Image (cartoon, rainbow, N blue to C red):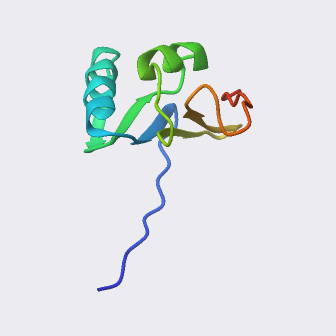
């Protein structure tokens, strides 16, 4: 069976996809619902693009090694994409999302 690909663009919204453990996913799910997110699937949400990165970080909270949360937003005049990972990656490098 062949996979299908669908392009998605929702102006003013940000798509968030979590690749995490089940316990982290449950916590993140509850936090996203509290900020008005719309569930797109078991680990994907649609949220307002106006939410600052700092607020998005607070909603996601701490991640464990190997967990990642992607966020993608597009609009007519810009595109903001990034990802969150655990605070320290291999080699003690700190990785954080920016606008």
Q: Residue 10: give x, y in percent of width and height.
A: 47, 42
Residue drawn at x 47%, y 28% is 63
Q: Quadrant of residue 38?
A: top left
Closer to the camera in the image, 42 or 63 = 63
Q: How many marks?
A: 0
Q: Residue 42: give x, y in percent of width and height.
A: 25, 44
Q: Quadrant of residue 86?
A: top right
Q: Is residue 89 left or right of residue 68?
A: right
Farthest bottom residue in view: 1
Residue 7 appears in view: yes
**Vertical arrangement, residue 18 with respect to residue 26, above or below:** below
**Vertical arrangement, residue 28 with respect to residue 65, above or below:** above
Q: Residue 34: give x, y in percent of width and height.
A: 29, 15
Closer to the camera in the image, 39 or 63 = 63
Residue drawn at x 43%, y 69% is 5
**Vertical arrangement, residue 3 with respect to residue 24, above or below:** below
**Vertical arrangement, residue 73 with respect to residue 9, above or below:** above
Closer to the camera in the image, 33 or 78 = 33
Q: Is residue 19 left or right of residue 1?
A: right
Residue drawn at x 65%, y 36% is 89
Residue drawn at x 51%, y 13% is 55
Residue 99 appears in view: no
Closer to the camera in the image, 44 or 86 = 86
Quadrant for the N terminus in the image: bottom left
Quadrant for the C terminus in the image: top right
Q: Is residue 13 left or right of residue 33?
A: right
Q: Residue 90: give x, y in percent of width and height.
A: 68, 40
């Amino acid at each position: 069976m062949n996979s299908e690909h669908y392009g998605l663009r929702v102006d003013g919204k940000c798509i968030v996809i979590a690749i995490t453990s089940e316990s982290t996913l449950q916590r993140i799910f509850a936090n996203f619902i509290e900020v008005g997110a719309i569930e797109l699937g078991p680990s994907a949400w649609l949220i307002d693009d106006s939410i600052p990165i700092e607020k998005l970080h607070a909603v996601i909270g701490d991640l464990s090694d190997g967990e990642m949360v992607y966020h993608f937003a597009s609009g007519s005049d810009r595109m903001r994409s990034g990802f969150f990972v655990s605070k320290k990656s291999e080699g003690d490098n700190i990785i954080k999302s920016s606008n």
